[in-house]
Image (cartoon, rainbow, N blue to C red):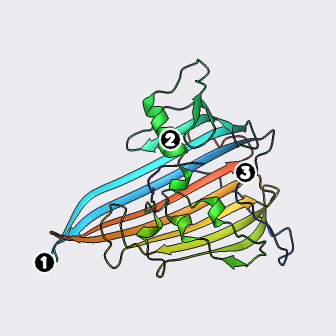
Amino acid sequence: MTTPRLALAALAAGAALVVVAVGASPVGADDKHTLDRLPQFKLPELFTESEEIDHRTVRKTISPEGEEKRGRRNRTEIQYAAEVIVLDESSGERMIQFWEAKERGRGVPELSGARFIVRNEMALTDLGDEDGKKADATQRAFLLQTYLAHDRIYPRREHLMPEEPVAEGDAWSPPLEAFLSCTALNEARRIDPAKSTASARLDKIVDKDGVTSAVIVYEANLVPVLLPSGKTADEGSKAVVEGTLTIPLDGRPIPETHQVRIDTVWLHADGRGEAAELSNSHVRFKTRIPGKRKKKKGGGD
């Protein structure tokens, strides 16, 4: 799915997604597998998407005398679910219809029943709901900043995949650039490549919902020289990304799960002492074949 253009960081607070049982490896452990860099949409294709984001940030300043002063604390929690129909397999053009979208604290625009055609990250066609009502500016802003901003919170899939076929247990080194957007560093010049590392591994091949799937685990440790604010990073600044991506071996977009944790520590000195911004996040994205929605406590769908 897609999500905010900022690095939404988080500690998952009670995920509400259905847990999928994962079976044993259906193929030989030594078999080599080619992992598609992008999902291969097929027609007809109908699936559901859901996502949860939990982002927390704390700012504090330590004076030259050692006195600590805590500043603003932010927390953002977003959940949404939608049904997706692929319209064009070459471009990935698809229609999305929301059935739920909510945000703790502020409340996202009401999107139940809203329908859009998505062509790329900035191209939307508003079909309106069943009564023909179109989205307002607030709803469109939510879509562009949250639903259509996947690469701003997840490492880009095409950068994570190995260039050569791999077997279970094989490891490779994704480019550091794969992790720049999701940490809000954005530019290669902002990190020290000599001190930064990234790794990925084909952990196992599993049977998930009857589909042979690859489980990829990855980690990146980035050491910045410039912070997202443009200020010089002090020693101790870091961004740590850890994730697990499960994708079908045949390249289809379903079923897929992607869980990521991002922790950042931005340190810089100013006239008032050492300023710090601590951020942590946990996000989970999931696609699955349509089925009965899990009923909420109290009765409704």
Mark 2 and mark 3 lie on one chain; the one further toward the N terminus is 2
237 vs 25, left or right, is: left
Which mark sits nearer the N-terminus, 3 or 1?
1
Residue 298 drawn at (x, y percent): 56, 38
Q: Is residue 72 above or below residue 240?
A: above
Kind of residue indicated by mark 2: Leu
- Label 1 sits on what residue type? Glu
Relative height, residue 25 to residue 6 (above, below): below
Coordinates of residue 113 in the picture (x, y in percent): 59, 29
Separation of marks 2 and 3 at Cα, in angstroms: 21 Å
Disc number for residue 253: 3
Q: Closer to the observer: label 2 or label 3?
A: 2
Q: What element carries label 1?
A: loop
Q: Mark 1 points at which residue?
A: 65
User: Looking at the image, can residue 114 be seen?
Assistant: no
Residue type at mark 3 is Pro
As drawn, which residue projects farthest toward the left? 65
Which label sits on residue 144? 2
Residue 281 or residue 237, whichever sits in front: 237
Assign a secondary structure to mark 2: helix
- The image shows residue 142 at horizontal and vertical percentages of 47, 39
Q: Which of 106 and 136 is in front in this view?
A: 136
Query: Which quadrant holds residue 279?
Result: bottom left
Neighbourhood count class around disc 1 (C-alpha, 10 Å): few under 14, some 14–19, many 20 upward? few
